[in-house]
Image: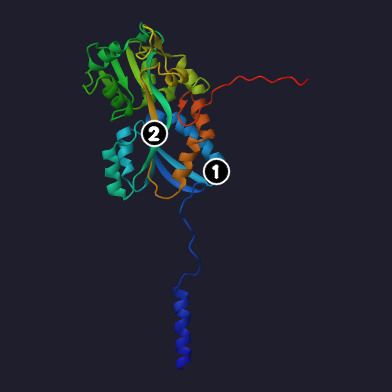
Amino acid sequence: MRRVLYYGWFLILLSCGPSQKKEDTRDSPVKGSINISVDESFKPVIEEQIQVHHSSFPATTIHASFKSEAACFRDLQSDSTRMIIVAKGLSDKEAEYYESRLLFKPQYGELAYDAIAVIVNRAAKDSVFTMEQIKNILSGKNNITAVMDGKNATSTVRFLQDSVLRGAPLGVNVVASENSEKVIDIVSNNPNVIGFVGLSWVGDSYDPKQEAYQKKIRMALVECVNCIEKDVFAKPSQATITFGEYPLARPLYYILKENAAGLGTGFMNFMSLERGQLIFRRAFLAPAKMGFNQRTGKIKDAD
């Protein structure tokens, strides 16, 4: 009888234990699912990056939330957000802060160079601006209505305040729209306003949606402040960004929160290597990791 009881307890213990090995749910560079937060001004090109990445690695899912730069940095503190893509890297003080919270330093680096495009209606009287004129519009000395790409703290607002106004406040003539697409809609329907959006939204002439935008708006020419020649004005483009001719160029950064190689590392590598860099180039941004210069060559005929 005692042997039977022991045998019964042995069966119960076996039934209470794990019936099978648990599936490994950790992501890797080529499989799994993660959440990332992206500066809304980069939405078109990052959507394209994700689409191509998914087609190349079908076992992966990257959920992207597009929002203001300030909201992206708040998300970086969240356990659910693995990576953010924004227009600035981390200062030493910020890196130390995140290290104290995460117990490791986030990785960050440049992926490409974008620009803030100054856009005007096709019927606008002015489409050529000096940097002094841009400064006067942003400060309110010139009271033309200027429309920004978000109601929260966006990278566009931060860049213009830091680089053009040198920390001075925006004028009361500067108004906020819901997002970049709304800025384009407002400028498309009003010849008396000026808009500021990321080049990724209006610079791709191969994109049917952006081609339709270009029939309603113009990208303004802005004074080149680094050119030796005077009175040189440039539109934002790969060439003018690369050669420092367009003054409102800015970097596009990834900030990655992984202390082991996961899907975030895989997506960062994808954007940093040839295919991802070609996508940035195809979107008319300037790739930061790889150069794609054309080179001429000669083939000597065989005797």
Q: Name the image quarter holding the C terminus.
A: top right
Of residues 198 and 299, the one drawn nearer to the viewer in this rendering: 299
Q: Nearer the viewer, residue 281 or 185?
A: 281
Count up the numbered dots. 2
Judge whether 201 appears above or below 133 on screen.
below
Q: Amino acid at mark 2?
A: Tyr
Gap between marks 1 and 2 measured at Cα: 23 Å
Q: Measuring 28% from the left and 43% from the top, which residue is drawn there?
A: 96
* Residue 202 point in image, percent of width and height: 44, 21
| 1 or 2: mark nearer the eye | 2
Callout 2: SS: strand
In the picture, residue 301 is in which quadrant? top right
Where does residue 52 sit, x and y in percent of width and height?
Answer: 53, 36
Residue lying at 48% horizontally and 63% vertically, measured from the top left: 22
Residue type marked 1: Phe
Badge 1: residue crowd in 10 Å (few <14, some 14–19, many ≥20): some
CB under 8 Å between discs 1 and 2:
no
The disc, 1 or 2, on the residue closer to the chain's N-terminal end is 1
Q: In the shown orientation, is residue 213 left or right of residue 224? A: right
**In the picture provided, is 202 more to the left or to the right than 131?**
right
Give the label on residue 253, or none.
Answer: 2
Q: Residue at x 23, y 16 (%)?
A: 139
* The image quarter in which residue 171 lies: top left
Residue 215 shows which numbered tag?
Answer: none
Residue 98 x/y as whole percent: 29, 44
* SS class, disc 1: loop
Compared to 47, does 97 lie above or below? below
Badge number at residue 57: 1
